[in-house]
Each structure stands twice: as C-alpha cells, then as structure tokens.
Amino acid sequence: MDTDNNLSREEDEAHAAWINQPPAHRSAADVLITPDDIMEMEPCDRYSRDRVKELFGDETGATFEEVASDQRISPLDGLWVLLNFPPWLTDGQRGELACRFAERVLPFYEERRTADLRGFIEVRRRFIAGGASLDELDKVYEDIEALYGEHYEAVADRGGFTGEYQPTPVFNTHERWEARSICRVLSTVKKAVQGLTWDAGMEAWCAVEQMIHAGVRHPGKGVEHHWQIQQTLEMIRSGEKT
C-alpha cells in the first residue's frame, strides 16, 4: 500500500470538505481571491488576465481586506469584487446592503419631496425576510419606476440633463443640480427595490456627487465609497445569513 498517496488523498478530501462548508462556517480572513476567481467572474475589459495577476498575485491571491484597501483597484471595482465573489454573500445580504446604500441618500429627497421612499425600501426588506410576496415587490417596483419616470421626464423637458435649456420654464444652475440629484436618489431606490446592490451603490455615489454641485455640504464621494466598502466588509465578516 502506498501510504504517501493515501495521506495525500485524505488531505485532499479534508480540504474539499472545508472548501464546501457554508460560508458562515469559515472565516473571511482565510479566504483568498485568486486570478482564476476574478476571471471566472468575467470582469470588464480593463482587467485582462495579466492585469489581474499583477493585482491579485500569480498564485497567492488576495484577501477581502486587501482588495478593499488596494489603491490600484478603484472603489467601484473593489466593491464589485466584494459583492460578487462566490459564494460568500447571500442574495439576502446583498439585498440588505442595497437598502442601506439607498437609505444614505434619502434625506436629500425627503427635505424636498413627500413620497415615502423608505416604504419602498422596507417592502424589499420584508421580501428578503419572507414577509412580502413577489406581487407586492412588483407593485412597489412599478410605483418607484413611475415616480422616477415622471421626474426624469420633467427634468429632461427643461433641459436639466443636457444643459440645453428650453425657452420656458428654465432651470438656473442650482435648480438643475438639485433636480438631477433627486433623479439619482430615485434611481438609487429603484435599484435597491430590484436588489441590484452594485448598481445601487454606484447610483448613490453619483447622487452624492450631484448633491455637492447642488450646494449640499458633504465630505465627498470618497467618503461614500469608503462607507459602502466598510459596510460590505462587515457583512462579509459577520457570517450572518439573511
């Protein structure tokens, strides 16, 4: 009997059992994201295999924390990796993060409009927890889509997106940025209701950028980037399943 081969086979089986444990039974600190993992996730064209190897190591890989802190990876791309690396975050956890991202930009809207956007988000949360039906979620999506479309068309009709102002009525610069910001907030909530976490994060970043143009005092989009990534890392570390 070849004892060495038996030991190797036993070690392989033990490793396979560890890899296949539910994520809650593994430590996030133990996970290494390899170039092969990234390529299987089908990144955009800016990330060729050679580029990915440069960032994640030829064989060694990178931890979640390293991906989040690597200055060579844009915050948008870093968030994409953290959200989509399989099979760590559940759909429910990603959905909860989308709700949090949207809630961060709601105050700007709430100070200027009366529609209950938080109610839309709460239906998504109840759906994640099994307390709302797909029909309820579809109805909420139709409502937020209609609200977004109505506002978008009103802004577009007044040249609010192109700067090519219509004869009357017209926006001044402040009004134009405020209207754009409201549109971005609505789009962020729409993405959250759909459960599109990365998209909700990106829309929230754009909303913050436009709010600053509208005169809102905010430390900047970079702070929002950092907050979203930290929220995602905390969800990854928690091991809690939603």
Image: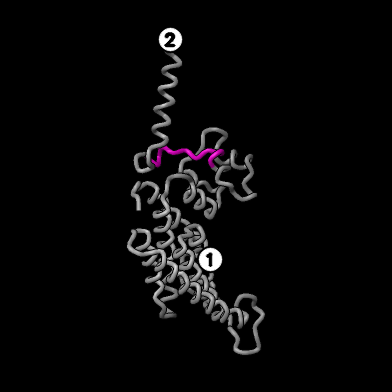
Q: Which residue is depicted at the point 54% across and 79% down?
A: 174
At a point 45% along the width and 16% down the height, the residue shown is 5
Q: Is residue 21 visible?
A: yes
Residue 69 vertical placement versus 108 (above, below): above
Dot placed on the residue nearer the N-terminal end, 1 or 2: 2
Residue at (52%, 73%) from the top-left corner? Answer: 183
Give the vertical position of 127 relative to 237 (above or below): below
- Real-space Cα separation, disc 1 to disc 2, in angstroms: 65 Å
Q: Amino acid at mark 2?
A: Met
Q: Which mark is residue 231?
A: none
Q: Tell me the element at label 1.
A: helix
Q: Residues within 10 Å of mark 1 (few under 14, many from 20)?
A: some
Badge 2 crowding class, 10 Å Cα cut-off, few under 14, some 14 to 19, many 20 or more, is few
Do callouts 1 and 2 mark residues in contact (Cβ within 8 Å)? no
Q: Is residue 155 above or below residue 68?
A: below
Which residue reaches farthest bottom? 168
Up-down: is 76 above or below 171?
A: above
Residue 206, numbered circle: 1
- Which color scheme is applied? one colour
Callout 2 secondary element: loop
Q: Is residue 239 left or right of residue 204?
A: left
- Tell me if residue 70 is in the magenta stretch: no
Residue type of the residue flagged with mark 1: Cys
- Image coordinates for residue 206, horizontal then vertical, percent: 53, 66
* Coordinates of residue 81 in the picture (x, y in percent): 51, 48
Quadrant (top left, top right, bottom left, bottom right) of the N terminus: top left
User: Circle 2 sits on which residue?
Assistant: 1
Q: Which residues are magenta?
A: 27-37
